[in-house]
Image: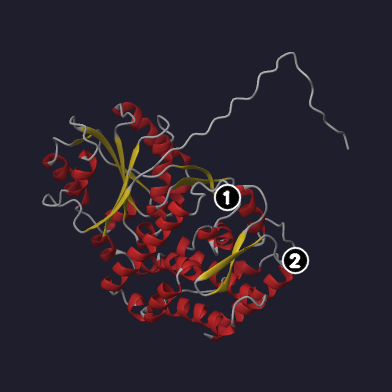
């Protein structure tokens, strides 16, 4: 091996060491009727920085939302007119596709950038994103790459958006067949959760976001998992009071982790909040995104919980509680894509390829979270693929018998 030694130079200048500390503050609000004239929350958030001149705002709306909220654009226009001393709409709202497809099409980023440019937005202006988690991810990426960051206001309209993706610091789009290959870490200016949006969700989107609550409960809060397990039937039957409690606690746990983990921008190799996600991200791609993100996460949670049980970490009784709760919530826990090309771990259609992609996303060594017990995750840096194959078989048998 070639050895490298430090070469002498004609200069003896010492390196300049620099440490930059940046503090981000943002609030997650909970309300109803966000765009009603008698609800000043949005205007108050925009005016909260103390700047007196009306701010320019560009609005991006999830097109799928308009099927159920056909008065939304009208309400938004009336609201902006009523608070014109605080902000102005700098263009007609941009309507984009809903769902994961919006993260697969770079043209949406280009469209938003063009309108930001034409409207003359600056870093003291706002991009207001209204929609599901995928739309928020995409709009966040567009906003944070224009002028190196325009203030982003998120209005999540799904359970998953309100309790997970919408309250975090990540933005991104898919590329090269990989989930969130392009992205940024940039906290939003504020998050405004309007619980009224949840009343018009279809059952799949209602259920999908619950998977992220199960995830964070399993790795951080046994009492919260007990709450979900106790009220699984009510959640499946769309009890709004129980869902409101679930969203609030799930958001709280996510924010506590982001603020208190010591690694909010994932500079290391650890991603505990992505428990169950290495398989989920791969399954989304393998199913051509016919699986909702939360549906894929539920399968990933079930798979990693089963593997945790087979390794002796998780008690059988706890394993049964995890899978039983997911089933009671209405999730399917096995899809055929889990078993494709298992004899070729590096095959692009093998779910195990997701382990490589998961590691590549951060770099460093593979680090995934398993369950030591309900409410307590633990990190491992290597896995036994033959045992994971057994876990996949067990999951298939469980699904067939339940």
Residue for badge 1: 178
Crowd around label 1: few <14 · some 14–19 · many ≥20 (10 Å): some
Q: Residue 364 vs residue 196: left or right?
A: right
Residue at screen point 54% across, 61% down: 277
Seen in the picture, residue 399 relative to 81 is either above or below; the reply is below
Residue 206, percent from left and from top: 35, 67
Q: Quadrant of the N terminus?
A: top right
Given residues 32 and 245, the one toward you in this image is 245
Q: Residue 35 vs residue 295: left or right?
A: left
Q: Which mark is residue 189?
A: none
Residue 50, percent from left and from top: 21, 35
- What is the spatial separation of the Cα atoms under label 1 and label 2, in whole angstroms? 21 Å
Seen in the picture, residue 197 relative to 398 is either above or below; the reply is above
Q: Residue 4 vs residue 389: left or right?
A: right
Q: Which mark is residue 343?
A: 2
Residue 156, percent from left and from top: 33, 54
Given residues 368 and 13, the one toward you in this image is 13
Residue 377, percent from left and from top: 55, 67
């Amino acid at each position: 091996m070639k050895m490298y030694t430090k070469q002498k130079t004609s200069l003896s200048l010492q390196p300049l060491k620099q440490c930059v500390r940046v503090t981000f503050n943002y609030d997650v609000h909970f309300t109803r009727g966000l765009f009603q004239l008698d609800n000043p929350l949005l205007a108050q958030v925009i005016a909260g920085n103390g700047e007196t001149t009306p701010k320019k705002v560009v609005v991006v709306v999830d097109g799928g939302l308009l099927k159920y909220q056909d008065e939304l654009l009208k309400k938004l226009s009336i609201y902006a007119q009523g608070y014109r001393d605080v902000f102005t709409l700098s263009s007609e709202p941009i309507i984009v596709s809903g769902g994961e497809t919006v993260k697969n099409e770079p043209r949406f980023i280009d469209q938003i950038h063009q309108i930001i440019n034409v409207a003359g937005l600056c870093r003291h202006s706002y991009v207001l994103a209204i929609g599901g988690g995928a739309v928020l991810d995409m709009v966040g990426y567009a906003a944070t790459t224009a002028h190196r960051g325009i203030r982003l206001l998120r209005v999540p309209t799904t359970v998953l958006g309100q309790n997970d993706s919408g309250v975090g610091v990540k933005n991104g789009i898919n590329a090269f067949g990989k989930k969130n290959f392009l992205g940024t870490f940039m906290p939003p200016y504020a998050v405004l959760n309007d619980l009224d949006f949840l009343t018009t969700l279809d059952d799949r989107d209602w259920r999908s976001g619950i998977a992220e609550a199960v995830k964070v409960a399993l790795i951080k809060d046994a009492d919260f998992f007990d709450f979900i397990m106790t009220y699984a039937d009510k959640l499946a039957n769309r009890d709004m009071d129980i869902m409101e409690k679930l969203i609030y606690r799930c958001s709280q746990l996510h924010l506590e982790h982001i603020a208190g983990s010591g690694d909010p921008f994932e500079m290391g190799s650890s991603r505990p909040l992505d428990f169950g996600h290495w398989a989920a991200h791969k399954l989304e791609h393998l199913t051509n995104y016919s699986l909702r993100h939360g549906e894929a996460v539920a399968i990933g949670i079930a798979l990693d919980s089963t593997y945790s049980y087979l390794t002796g970490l998780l008690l059988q009784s706890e394993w049964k509680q995890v899978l039983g709760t997911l089933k009671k919530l209405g999730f399917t826990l096995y899809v055929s894509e889990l078993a494709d090309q298992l004899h070729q771990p590096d095959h692009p259609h093998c779910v195990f390829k997701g382990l490589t992609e998961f590691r590549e996303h951060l770099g460093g060594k593979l680090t995934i979270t398993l369950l030591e017990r309900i409410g307590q995750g633990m990190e491992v840096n290597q896995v036994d693929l033959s045992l994971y194959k057994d876990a996949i078989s067990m999951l298939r048998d469980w699904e067939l018998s339940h």
